[in-house]
Amino acid sequence: MILANGIVITNDKENNFYDNGAVYVRDNVIEDLGPSEEIKNKYPNEEVIDCSGRVIMPGMICAHSHIYSTYARGMAASKPTDNFYNVLKNLWWALDKKLTLEDVKLNGLTMFMESITNGVTTVIDHHAGPNSVEGSLFALAEAAKETGMRASLCYEVSDRDGQEIADKGIKENIDWIKACQKDNHGDMLHGLFGLHAAFTLSDRTLEKARTEMEGLYNGYHVHVAEGIEDQWESVQKHGKRVVERLESFDILSENTLAIHNVHINAREMDILAYHKTPAVFNPESNMNNAVGCPPILRMMEKGITVGLGTDAYTNDMFESMKVSNILLSHNACDPTKGFGETLQLQFKNNPLIMNRYLEREIGVLKKGAYADIITLDYDPITPLNKDNWGGHSLFGFTGKIVNDTIINGEFVMRNKIIQKVDQKEIHAKSRQRAAEIWPGM
């Protein structure tokens, strides 16, 4: 098929841009792109999809989220949430305990659909649910396959619910990683080894995780010093700061994702940079939990690849970009900061992070890349060109104007209608189940 007659943002190294462009997709790969008439004449027998009045661009990538939190929208917690630890204990750790495997898949379906409607084509998720550990990642994988989402999944191992649950989490991660290494469903599914955070992980559990991961060469997905409590516990109990402790268990590598990093110091940044470990910034979540702003600008100066996630606060990466820009400039007390850095996080670094795990590139429209493409209904009120599309993406684009979402060469949303599953039916089931869970919160 040919997506034609649209404004094409390629996000490639040359920043190719077409005022009236077309993208030729064959199977699941971008075969060619260029001016519309040239591409249509070059492939006269291909179906042409008219994208007049739309922007054609790479699908968005979310580098960190939590599907398990889906039922929380509109929910009230009855116990205190006056500090970060109480937020975890009385909200998220209370909610994840209530999830069954059916809930896990239902949460996956609703979250993936909402991501698709906002133009997100890849999600890196960090799952939790101590009473439904076994098979949970496989349930999420079924949801990803049914909706058409590209996903990297893991289970967050923690000692907070006891050694038996921690061991189940280790096994679920290993089983899932091995399953993906055997069959990743055409590069659509991927596995990391999830760890909650250093302050809920014993040396025994970290050592067992390291032992089980030997020879698998996949990375970890771990929260790092999101709250100051993580650093306090690490220093008091282990005599090391969080990043130092993770390094001592061989957790850090170029395939590992270090999430949040709000309270790390310069030495810890140097350690992350040395191991080429990417970090992920979740601006709205950090502000909502009042934990602080990570030293993103300093990490970037030190050569750390910093990506952008949502921590499940939203499923709209354009929204997350807007807040990233504001928070970084506000925190630096410098209005020249935030804009360029945010564009780098989403459009350069998120693809760099995910492409470490894939056989072909995503996050770019170029020949040979996977066909993960979105179109936006966008009638710009000022000129849109190759030099300023980043400004339009921050101050004009939103998830709500996404019209079509194509993942791996297949329409998963067309003309704002989810294609592969019954969205209304799934939403109805989710509302019913959430109403059953809320009274216990």
Image (cartoon, rainbow, N blue to C red):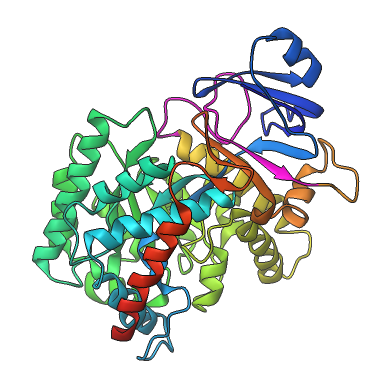
Residue 189 higher or lower than 35, as above or below: below
Kindly give the residue lying farthest to the left in the view shown. Answer: 164
Given residues 193 and 204, the one toward you in this image is: 193
Q: Residue at x 64, y 60 (%)?
A: 319
Query: Number of labelled discs?
Result: 0
Residue 210 higher or lower than 74, as above or below: above
Q: Quadrant of residue 201?
A: bottom left
Image quadrant where one finds the N terminus: top right
For residue 64, say whether it is visible.
no
Residue 15 percent coordinates (x, y): 73, 30
In the drawing, does residue 162 fall left or right of residue 193? left
In the drawing, does residue 398 fall left or right of residue 226? right
Q: Quadrant of residue 376?
A: top right
Residue 91 percent coordinates (x, y): 36, 79
Given residues 367 and 427, the one toward you in this image is: 427
> Residue 167: within the magenta?
no
Q: Residue at x 23, y 59 (%)?
A: 101
For residue 357, say whether it is visible.
yes
In the drawing, does residue 315 fall left or right of residue 137? right
Q: Residue at x 79, y 20 (%)?
A: 35
> Residue 359: within the magenta?
yes
Residue 363 percent coordinates (x, y): 57, 36
Q: Residue at x 22, y 48 (%)?
A: 173
In the drawing, does residue 22 fall left or right of residue 291? right
Kindly give the residue lying farthest to the right in the view shown. Answer: 382
Residue 441 higher or lower than 267, as above or below: below
Q: Quadrant of residue 394?
A: bottom right
Residue 118 percent coordinates (x, y): 59, 52
Chief SS of the magenta region: loop
Image quadrant where one finds the C terminus: bottom left
- Specify start and end residues of the magenta stretch as a single range: 356-378
